[in-house]
Image (spheres, rainbow, N blue to C red):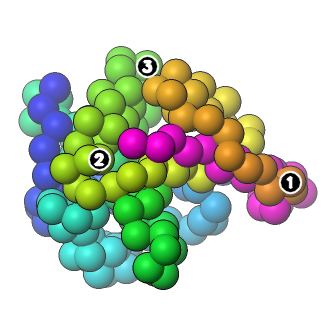
């Protein structure tokens, strides 16, 4: 497995992985698939030296990705970043999410980040376990804040100081 900065040519694979996750109602609060045109500005906001977007590549295929996002655009929160991880369904349970998360933790200081946060839907047990195994703690819970059809879901905020 190679973890590297994402290139614009990787965007279709990134979108495919994201859209597959959207359909499960487990890892994102979006309902509809996103398009290349919608995601291109999002992709271009990532910078390898500030808020990177990484892909995990296995045998030429994008198996997963991790993105950093600014937490809140106010000076007191500078150095805090939200991270998101998505893994292609055929590559799950092979350590890809763990490898991406470990790289994020290892690179956080170089990126001038002092805290990493994750927003995880409460019923996404696998993601909660992944982050907790990497030393993240539960910093908050917003009960029944998300609604998927007839199901109300909690949002769990996990975090780790660097």
Mark 2 vs mark 1: in front = 2
> Circle 3 is placed at which residue position?
93
* Residue name at image x 23 percent, y 43 percent: 107
Task: Give the SS element for disc 1.
Answer: strand
Asked whether residue 144 is in view, the answer is yes
Mark 3 vs mark 1: in front = 1
Question: In this image, 8 relative to 46: left or right?
Answer: left
Residue 10 x/y as whole percent: 17, 56
As displayed, is residue 74 above or below residue 101?
Answer: below
* Residue name at image x 26 percent, y 57 percent: 112
As for residue 159 lying within the magenta part, the answer is yes
**Marks 3,1: beta carbons within 8 A:** no
On residue 55, the disc is none
* Residue name at image x 64 percent, y 61 percent: 29
Towards the viewer: 81 or 123: 81
Separation of residues labelled 3 and 1 (CA atoms): 28 Å
**Marks 2,1: beta carbons within 8 A:** no
Looking at the rendered structure, the number of numbered marks drawn on it comes to 3
Task: Give the SS element for disc 3.
Answer: loop
What crowding class fits label 1: few (fewer than 14 Cα within 10 Å), some (14-19), or many (20 or more)?
few
> Circle 1 is placed at which residue position?
143
Which residues are drawn in magenta?
Answer: 145-162
Asked whether residue 26 is in view, the answer is no
For marks 3 and 1, the one nearer the N-term is 3
> Circle 2 is placed at which residue position?
108
Residue 13 x/y as whole percent: 26, 52
Residue 133 x/y as whole percent: 52, 22
Towards the viewer: 76 or 108: 76
* Predominant secondary structure, magenta span: strand
């Amino acid at each position: 497995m190679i973890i590297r900065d994402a290139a614009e040519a990787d965007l279709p694979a990134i979108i495919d992985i994201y859209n597959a996750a959207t359909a499960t109602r487990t890892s994102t609060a979006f309902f509809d698939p996103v398009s290349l045109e919608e995601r291109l500005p999002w992709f271009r906001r990532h910078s390898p030296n500030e808020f990177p977007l990484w892909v995990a590549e296995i045998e030429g295929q994008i198996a997963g990705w991790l993105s950093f996002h600014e937490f809140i655009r106010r000076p007191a929160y500078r150095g805090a970043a939200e991270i998101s991880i998505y893994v292609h369904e055929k590559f799950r349970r092979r350590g890809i999410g763990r490898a991406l998360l470990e790289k994020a933790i290892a690179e956080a200081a170089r990126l001038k980040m002092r805290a990493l946060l994750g927003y995880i839907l409460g019923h996404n047990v696998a993601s909660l376990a992944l982050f907790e195994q990497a030393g993240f703690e539960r910093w908050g819970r917003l009960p029944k804040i998300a609604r998927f059809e007839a199901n109300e879901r909690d949002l769990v905020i996990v975090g780790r100081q660097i």
